Image (spheres, coloured by chain):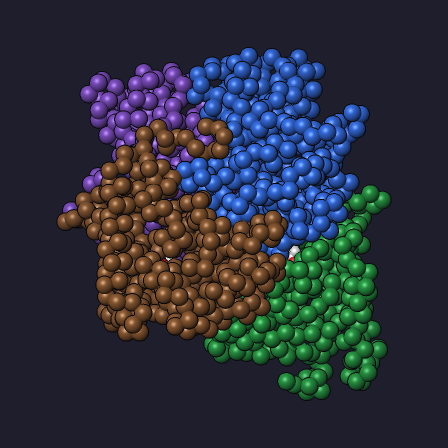
Chain colours: A blue, B purple, C brown, D green
Amino acid sequence: MARKLPMYKAISEAIAQEMEKDENIFVMGEDIGAYGGIFGATSGLLEKFGPERVRDTPICESAFIGAALGAASKGMRPIVELMFIDFFGVAMDQIYNHIAKAHYMSGGQVKMPVVIMTAMGGGYSDAAQHSQCLYGLFAHVPGLKVVIPSNSYDAKGLMISAIRDDNPVMYFFHKGLMGLGWMPSPPEATVEVPEEPYTVPIGEAKVVREGSDVTIVGVAKMVYEALWAAEELEKEGISAEVIDLRSLVPLDKKTLLDSVKKTGRLVVVDEDYRSYGMSGEVIATVVENGISLEAPPVRVAYPDVPVPYSRVLERYVLPDKEKIINAVKSIM
Amino acid sequence: MARKLPMYKAISEAIAQEMEKDENIFVMGEDIGAYGGIFGATSGLLEKFGPERVRDTPICESAFIGAALGAASKGMRPIVELMFIDFFGVAMDQIYNHIAKAHYMSGGQVKMPVVIMTAMGGGYSDAAQHSQCLYGLFAHVPGLKVVIPSNSYDAKGLMISAIRDDNPVMYFFHKGLMGLGWMPSPPEATVEVPEEPYTVPIGEAKVVREGSDVTIVGVAKMVYEALWAAEELEKEGISAEVIDLRSLVPLDKKTLLDSVKKTGRLVVVDEDYRSYGMSGEVIATVVENGISLEAPPVRVAYPDVPVPYSRVLERYVLPDKEKIINAVKSIM
Amino acid sequence: MEKIEEIPKETLLEIYRTMHKIRTYEETLAEWYYKGKTPRFDISAGPIPGELHLSSGQESAAVGVCMHLKPEDALIGTHRAHHFAIAKGVNLKKMTAEIFGKATGLSGGKGGHMHLFDASVNFSCSGIVGASFPQAVGVGIAAKLKGEDYVAVAVGGDGAANQGTFHEALNLAAVWKLPVIFVIEDNSWAISVPKEKSTAVSKNSERAAAYGIPGVSVDGMDVIAVYEVAKEAVERARRGEGPSLIEIKVYRLRGHFEGDPQHYRPKEDLELAKQKDPLLNFEKLLLEKGIATEEELNKIKEENIKEVQEAIDFAVNSPYPEPEEALKGVFAGGE
Amino acid sequence: MEKIEEIPKETLLEIYRTMHKIRTYEETLAEWYYKGKTPRFDISAGPIPGELHLSSGQESAAVGVCMHLKPEDALIGTHRAHHFAIAKGVNLKKMTAEIFGKATGLSGGKGGHMHLFDASVNFSCSGIVGASFPQAVGVGIAAKLKGEDYVAVAVGGDGAANQGTFHEALNLAAVWKLPVIFVIEDNSWAISVPKEKSTAVSKNSERAAAYGIPGVSVDGMDVIAVYEVAKEAVERARRGEGPSLIEIKVYRLRGHFEGDPQHYRPKEDLELAKQKDPLLNFEKLLLEKGIATEEELNKIKEENIKEVQEAIDFAVNSPYPEPEEALKGVFAGGE
Ligand SMILES: Cc1ncc(C[n+]2csc(CCOP(=O)(O)OP(=O)(O)O)c2C)c(N)n1
Ligand SMILES: Cc1ncc(C[n+]2csc(CCOP(=O)(O)OP(=O)(O)O)c2C)c(N)n1
Ligand SMILES: [Mg+2]
Ligand SMILES: [Mg+2]
């Protein structure tokens, strides 16, 4: 198992392996066929499974995401790609009012094993409508599981879990972790991936670095910024624990609370907008559980501004290692 | 000024008075003309201003909300009604990717004086797709101001502020506060409303009851539940301060922090879904500012479940006076 | 098109029975709805709280279409869906219990009148205008991928035909040649907005051309005409020849929802609706043509009244769900 | 329709000038885009980071339409909008600076290539497919309410015509008889998905019937044909007679975006595009008909090259914005 795979290949491998086993799985989305997905997450699938099971759609996100509901109601297990999460606004009704609620509203009669996978994240000057994270929105509305892998091992395992789950799962991948040749990606995200199928449980966070002075919590690309910050802090004698939440819904409160109990300090790093989102939720979860902190918790979050285009502007607002280091130091 | 008005009339009066002064204001939405708005917020406007300025639309929320952007770009000041906030998912793209961002993305060239008013809230068995609050979602994305009046005085003043604001304002009204004959509404929401136009500033919370032992924070209908709880608590010797946030964006941090500094305890009441929303943000805002609490903060929020239909089920999940009382007692 | 004479009597009586059952059901439900809501109307009060959208006057649309459907066929309705539910064979007792918010309801009281689900006959509906169209497309995909011959029917009102989902779904179904029948139930009103002020064409069937699919407008006064048109569309879909669009002209006998003051509605329009009653019309036809006797119809009526009463009794006598149920069932297989 | 002979030479040369300017601009920008991105393509690197959608091959659509527009008329473009921006008269220097992310850009570097705004000529565009249609409707409302005779043009690709917003906006504009021209720029592709796999009709102009408005398909190879068709639609709108739909068939000379490997695209399709070059075609026509001499055209070319170079120089030599600018300007009138 010395095989390293970039995240985009880990995802498409997971889908392919599950599709081989289960005829009910099929994939829909824009440019997911011949193109293989703009970010490669469906690469090779059309060749393997043909155009019936790997369906390039017209541009009509409401229709094909709504269609996932109809197909699921008939026992299918659709995987749909929403090319960028930024586009959710044209299809949100089908996602959150129908797919997310059908199980509950039907008193359990209907199951919705739908995976909605989508690209998120900025850092390459794609500006205000192609760089957002927005996972906080989906974590806010009930009925959707929300997962966000940060490396290719988790990407495969979480995708297989998402496909096998009988509930709708929002599967976010960060463009800047996919290991695409044309998009910068930290080499750390491309890790060893077993050939055989395996699962990473939805709802389990991971302590990716142990430490004793402060807990840094993040997802996706921010996990690396946190790890790099932790390395620097180490040199200055500050021992940071880093948690990769991996799932926002369900949230692994235990791992989070155990860590903060131990360290007594909390920094939340969030590439999604700062207010009314993930960073607030993590902090509230910690404090409402009565964990006493040695210093106020700090957020290193994307500020409440649209994503600007110009590189200098975007860099200024994106959370990064330096900002995390400063945040940690501010509470030591 | 001994004139009491129900909230729905306060809103339509505010709109009418502004429309009289400014020809650029017009109203669009479903059933806002002859019907006067399903919840009465536009009652009387068609008669006063005619069908050109009070436009009943087809059912096409993306189109008429997107049209608000185009009209605003030409100097108009559109008010659009989204009949229930639950329907946001069919029109969200125009709201958050365009109306909310146009000013920033254009480097200030374009102004978006758009008011999107919308009904929220449950409690009358309208079930999963007609009872939600969802203000947390709009507070999360940048570029939208978010206001939520709890009584007819604030309703008029905030509507006038919203109309005069050069920025997009999401104006939420709770159906159960409108003072409609056919929908239960606490009499306290129907207060004296001056005839002449006046403003309630966006971004200012209000301490609606002073107290010293605990701060209870809420919006809309939850303000009354909090007040009723406070009355009961008073009898037991617990002095609760109640804050009506009124605006979520901008959030009046000062009023919030001052109060919690004084009381040392915090209960957040939220009819929107519990996780990743308003309740978390309020708690995080308090603790990240280093305010030391005598007990962990508590949320009395709508749990992360779709709104059930049956009265017994809905009552069980809606935050109310009893739940607030229990929450407060749990931290005394 | 078949003439009424060529349709078996059994079928005609079945059509009558279902239409009459729907009318009986709706009018009975209306009575129950107002219990606890008089003298002052309070939407949250009474045994049936919340909004209630009844379908009286529109029975022919539901029955004409559903006569051709098997339980495996899916039907996805709107906020106004009782008639389609009944015609599709949804369990009437459980449906009524759901509308009364009872534990014995289709969804144990979680769904309610706008969210009726009966998986055993592939029925569902929702409160979002236009949401049905894409969902039916998905059923069509499933049929195609599984090689089954079931079809999907999406219902929308005349108002729904102006939503973006209408366009997206028809295009997608057409491009993929899916077994979907799109039904526009045109009652001339979207709440208070009349069709001519909302819709740029007089007949939505004209919009079928935008997707290269057949489009027909049919008079809902004539349930047999609806039956014939729907037959063709369903058969076409089953044969794998792709989607169709049917617009059925009906008249709304009641308000948009119960409690609707209908100030916006010209009196003549309501009068017209009463004259365009498809149930009375069909009854007259059956009698005039000598297809059925008064006695036969009366017997059906009595059976319907009894069945509806039993459903109401079942609902009324059923227990409410345990409150804690509200917290359960968000996710399958979990908590 | 006017013949080319009836159009003033001045106008024809103006058309040529703008088409050629666009082509020159796009090909120059492409060169700059790849600076810093070779040998390994890195989308985030170089003087122009992010996605870049160029319009080479589609100039006739922009110029044919915009020749009829005044600065007060609004044009709302798509992710691929440079040609429309230039034809609409957007300040080329500021536009280029914006694309280079500079402080002197239209939006001070906040918008970027997909979000070009020039309020002085009522130009805007965005990165969301189908978003332009409703927005143009709003401009139409403003014109109507203010009693002004300006019009709005919404541009969308062939892919955008399957979005729900297309349907909603056309219906709304038709119902309200607004001065809006909907332009579908059909380059046969939505990224990798060919039109015939996404669109249930061969010509989107057929969809105009669904809204009772005029619909025309026109060959973008012939810029004069586009010019004529657009003239009619714009005049109609100005006269208050309501919206029109125009589909313009063009060919995409480059990838969907720069860096697009175009594996999905048959070689013949790219070859065809090269043969269907509207700029070369028009140049040939002008010369063959003796309307212009090579010298005249060469002069125009040189002027364009110079103007483009000046715009690039301006952009390159402009400063980047101050980083803290990122936090400012979310709300008007406040910090
Ligand atoms: C997306 C959305 N917009 C608006 C509404 C509010 N609403 C409910 S029913 C209705 C009118 C529907 O008219 P039509 O489609 O003709 O159906 P009808 O009620 O006449 O059966 C409206 C506007 C909604 N439920 N969903
Ligand atoms: C709502 C939305 N869905 C998907 C995309 C991704 N996307 C960007 S351009 C494009 C293709 C557009 O095709 P078309 O409308 O024909 O325009 P063209 O690129 O050919 O000019 C897609 C799918 C988007 N930007 N917005
Ligand atoms: Mg209707
Ligand atoms: Mg195209």
Q: Is residue A170 above or below residue D312?
A: above
Which quadrant would residue B274 be assigned to in this image? top left
Q: Residue at x 64, y 60 (%)?
A: D198
Relative depth, front residue between B23 and C112? C112
Residue B272 seen in this snapshot: yes
**Viewed as shown, does residue B85 lie left or right of A198?**
left
Residue ID at (58%, 41%) = A77
**A328 or B94: nearer the viewer:** B94
Residue B3 is situated, as x and y percent measured from the top left of the image, at: 17, 48
Q: Residue at x 41, y 73 (%)?
A: C3
Residue B13 higher or lower than D268, as above or below: above
Numbered circles on residues, count: 0
Between residue C40 and residue A332, name the one nearer to us: C40
Tell me the quadrant of the picture where the C terminus of chain A can be found: top right
The x and y percentages for residue D319 are: 70, 47
State the image coordinates of residue D194 (x, y, percent, origin top left). 69, 60
User: What residue is shown at x 67% (from left), y 32% (from top)?
Assistant: A155
Q: Quadrant of residue A131?
A: top right
Q: Is residue B313 left or right of residue A262?
A: left
Residue B172: image quadrant is top left
Against D143, is B43 above or below?
above
Quick check: D187 above or below A155? below
Q: Position of residue B16 (x, y in %)?
A: 30, 58
Q: Quadrant of the N terminus of chain A?
A: top right
Q: Is residue B300 left or right of residue D115?
A: left
Residue D178, visible in the rendered structure = no
